[in-house]
Amino acid sequence: MPEKTSVLFVCTGNICRSPMSEGVFQSLAQTEPYTDLIDRIDSCGTGAYHVGDSPDRRTMATLKAKGVKGYKHAARQLRPSDFQEFDYIFAMDSSNLSGTKRIQQLKAPNGKAKVLLFGEYSGNGKVEQVEDPYYGGEEGFEVAYEQASGMA
């Protein structure tokens, strides 16, 4: 049996894109053939803007509408220990990627995590960024869900 993998998703405030991706990935990980492959899934933000808050209501409404049930999360900030605790850390955009790599270089240079842009797994042959829907309408959350589903 292969060793289980742990995955962390990172966005800016940990209330929109990264919890959306976490919820999608958790839902997927509960189905065959993935149930024995994923050990831990979490999300966080590069900033401490919303620590302790629930995800944006539009994130939760989109997940619920798409059939992702029972998802709960409290926003948290990226920690140096995350680079040792997770196998993969997926950033939502290039700014999150550079911020995450900077923290890794300064505070966790020996961490095992591979830090990547989640959009490298877009499936369409090009690297995509998951655009931040925070300041937009409901449709931005739909787009973020579709991107997360395709990349997961």
Image (tube, helix red, strand yellow):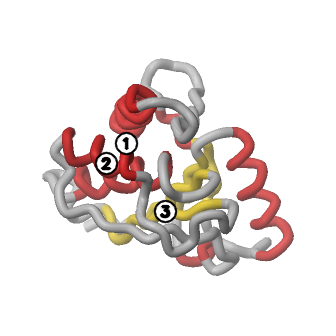
Horizontal side, residue 32 vs residue 14: left or right: left
Q: Write down the quadrant of residue 44 in the picture.
A: bottom right
Residue 96, how many percent across, how many down?
A: 69, 49
- For the C terminus, which image quadrant? top left
Name the residue that disc number 1 marks. Answer: 152
Residue 20, how many percent across, how many down?
A: 40, 48
Name the amino acid, label 3: Ser
Q: How far apart are labels 3 and 2 at the CA level?
A: 12 Å
- In depth, the one of 32 and 57 nearer the eye is 57
Q: Write down the quadrant of residue 108 in the picture.
A: bottom right
Instruction: Give the mark, 1 or 2, whose residue is nearer the N terminus.
Output: 2
Name the residue that disc number 3 marks. Answer: 43
Horizontal side, residue 3 vs residue 83: left or right: left
Badge nearest the viewer, 1 or 3: 3
In the image, is residue 99 above or below residue 1?
Answer: above
Q: Is residue 113 visible?
A: yes
Residue 24, how many percent across, how many down?
A: 31, 48
**Residue at screen point 46% across, 19% down:** 124
- For the N terminus, which image quadrant? bottom left
- In depth, the one of 60 and 147 nearer the eye is 60
Name the amino acid, label 2: Val
- In depth, the one of 55 and 109 nearer the eye is 55
Instruction: Give the mark, 1 or 3, whose residue is nearer the N terminus.
Output: 3
Name the amino acid, label 1: Ala
- Labelled pair 1, 2 in contact (Cβ < 8 Å): yes
Name the residue that disc number 2 marks. Answer: 24
Badge nearest the viewer, 1 or 2: 2
- SS for tag 3? strand
Horizontal side, residue 123 vs residue 12: left or right: left
